[in-house]
Image (spheres, grey):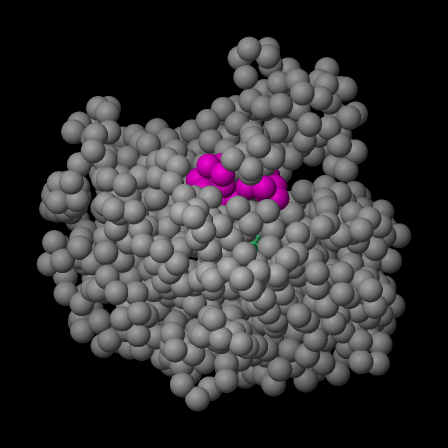
Amino acid sequence: MDSLPSLGVALADPGLAGTDTHCPYCALQCGMSVVQAEGVWSIAARDFPTNRGGLCRKGWTAAELLNGGDRLTTPLMRDHKGGPLRPATWEEALDRITTGIRAIQADAGADAVAVFGGGGLTNEKAYALGKFARVALGTANIDYNGRFCMASAAAAGLRAFGMDRGMPFPVSDIGGADAVFVSGGNPAETMPPLMQWFEEGRARGAHLIVSDPRRTATARAATLHLPLTPGTDAALANGLLNVAIARKLIDPDYIASRTEGWDRVRRIVASYWPDRVERITGVPGRDVERAAILLGEAARAEGGRAIILSGRGTEQQSHGVDNALAFINLALALGLPGRAGSGWGCLTGQGNGQGGREHGQKADQLPGYRLLANPQHRADVAAVWGVDPISLPQPGLSAVELLSATGGAGARIRGLLVFACNLLVSAPDAAALRGRLDQAELLVVADPFLSETAAIADVVLPVAQWAEESGTMTNLEGRVLLRRKAKEPPAGVWTDLQVIAALADRLGAKGFTADPEATGDEFRRCTAGGMADYAGASWDRLPVDAAGDAGVFWPCPDADHPGTPRPFLDRFAHPDGRARFHGIEHQGPAEQPCADYPLILTTGRVMGQYQSGTQTRRIPELAAAEPAAYAEMHPDTARQHGLAPGDDVALSTRRGSARMAVRLTRDIRRDTVFVPFHWGGEGSANRLTIAALDPVSRIPEYKACAVRLDRAPKESA
Ligand code: SF4
């Protein structure tokens, strides 16, 4: 077992007067101060319940982008398809967009214009974008890139618990647990300050168990690493439950009093004995037994506490919801969810991945986790918006389906407005997507930088970034917090809310404002009575710079409500208060290795880059640390393919090919190749990935497809 990675923990220098706010990146939403000295912006850490003064390398360097660089400060437009982007006035750009929208909708109907949002948008912006799509555009087609991330865990949580509160307990509970199982997650690289809670547990003798095809930094810190074959998570979870039953580690009283559906699950997992699970997953049967015993004994001990955490490795699969449900079955059988200090939770990745999926930028959804398909929900929200419920569209296409329907004449979607998302890097099967976006009649991208997607747009709108506007975020724990503005945007830059309000106005829609707090007040009214009820979480309850700043956990239905850190202590959110087991059989990935494509490609993240890299690739320190994509493989795999470290390799799948340098490690399965996905161009992992979707969450299968390796001539890479 290795030591946990250094966190770079430091506390704010009391001599520096800065603006207390939160990190622009991941869902841990670490507290930080943005400080200006001699005209240069920098970051100082500050104490907040999630990070306790710790920041990762991305957080420390986040102010770099406030100091200039290649920031967009004027709208850009193309006079004709294929022509160059040229500077334009805001008036010109907005005119072009509204003219284009009207022309497409007049010819092909309201749904022919779509909106694509992002999990990094504040709650207020996600809300405004959903309202803009349904009220100003009247289109059914809006979805967001959270569909690429947390959608399977969200769907599984809804099915099992009746509510999607990703991690329904504070991260401090991790420090108090006696055993933690991380399924397909690598927080030591993706959110390093979280590891202090694991370290706290380990100092007390707690066990960490990690299932991952790679022996990641998190796995190296674990008591036990289970190196499963990509796409076999449900079989592993069923095997763990099989052992827990055999060893009498389950909690029959909890199962009887708090759950439904146990008998079917017990029958199904009876055939997942350790030897069979070893054949499916590649994990030695004795390690399956040991993991189940470590977790089960912690759960059964007097006062014992155990936690299962789910990451993208388990969820970004064409059976991602089943995988997450199989681990929830294990958690329920051990009596963990709804027990203080124990539970099942999702390691949400994107900065506002939780809030972004609650307030209306999803294809099927209205604010407060209300549903477009529910007549009462439509009436509730329509009353706040001052519109007829009948005028609201029905649910639209989910992210990948929406992008697949986009194109030129004859396509179902001919105009696309993209906010806070770099689709050409983050979406699956990116080469095919590029062809479709090139044909679209109107592609609009709002971004602070000329991302790969903005570079092919017809109109590019320069918008403010995190520290240039205020708004609320909901972190991975369901904690609503205020990310405060630290500086004005550069001259010429608008906020997303300004853009949305201006476009709505030009399209003749009333009731939009560029003011984030006023948008927040309206958005909270819209959530009142919904599952994700924020009605009491007003900005004045989020005193960022006050002692005890800790945000407010939803549901928080009124101003006097203290918030709800652990929503399932007394009952789950299904009408009868009980959680649901779901019988899950192992099915495996949509695409299996074969003679032509004999290895398994899996994709993921590295510590020094964030998501599509639009921000972090522009930060010199981060770019120097991780300058380009690479193909990580076992030395034996490389040898079989005539590859050596630093060689250029061509990776090919049925979708396309990519080229990058070879990196060797013994910490990966011999049948698996890992590629980080933060880069575009020839090193784009998503030129390779498959757009196979989970039938429930519609998440793409980023974690497993069949791939071939060929040595590439150095000069062609
Ligand atoms: Fe914290 Fe995540 Fe920002 Fe790193 S990227 S400082 S872990 S919020």
Does the magenta run of residues contain 664?
no
Is 704 located above or below residue 206 in the figure? Answer: above
Picture residue at 66% right of the left edge, 18% below the top:
647
Q: Nearer the viewer, residue 403 or 144?
A: 144
Q: In this rendering, does residue 423 appear at all?
A: no
Instruction: Provide the major secondary structure of the magenta segment.
Output: loop
Residue 218 locus on image (x, y percent): 72, 50
Q: Quadrant of residue 123?
A: bottom left
Residue 483 locus on image (x, y percent): 43, 63
Q: In this rendering, does residue 171 appear at all?
A: yes
How many numbered marks appear? 0
Residue 467 locus on image (x, y percent): 40, 55
Q: Nearer the viewer, residue 552 or 130?
A: 552
Q: Nearer the viewer, residue 643 or 237?
A: 643
Q: Quadrant of residue 329?
A: bottom right
In the rendered image, which quarter contains the C terminus?
top right
Q: Quadrant of residue 179?
A: bottom right
| Left/right of residue 709 with respect to residue 671 in the rendered view | left
Picture residue at 17% right of the left edge, 44% below the top:
90
| Left/right of residue 336 with respect to residue 605 in the rendered view | right
| Left/right of residue 516 with respect to residue 477 in the rendered view | left
Picture residue at 15% right of the left edge, 40% below the top:
89
Q: Quadrant of ligand 1?
A: bottom right
Is 434 located above or below residue 536 in the figure? Answer: above
| Left/right of residue 702 with respect to residue 339 in the rendered view | left
User: Which stretch did the figure color magenta?
Assistant: 603-619
Residue 631 locus on image (x, y percent): 64, 29
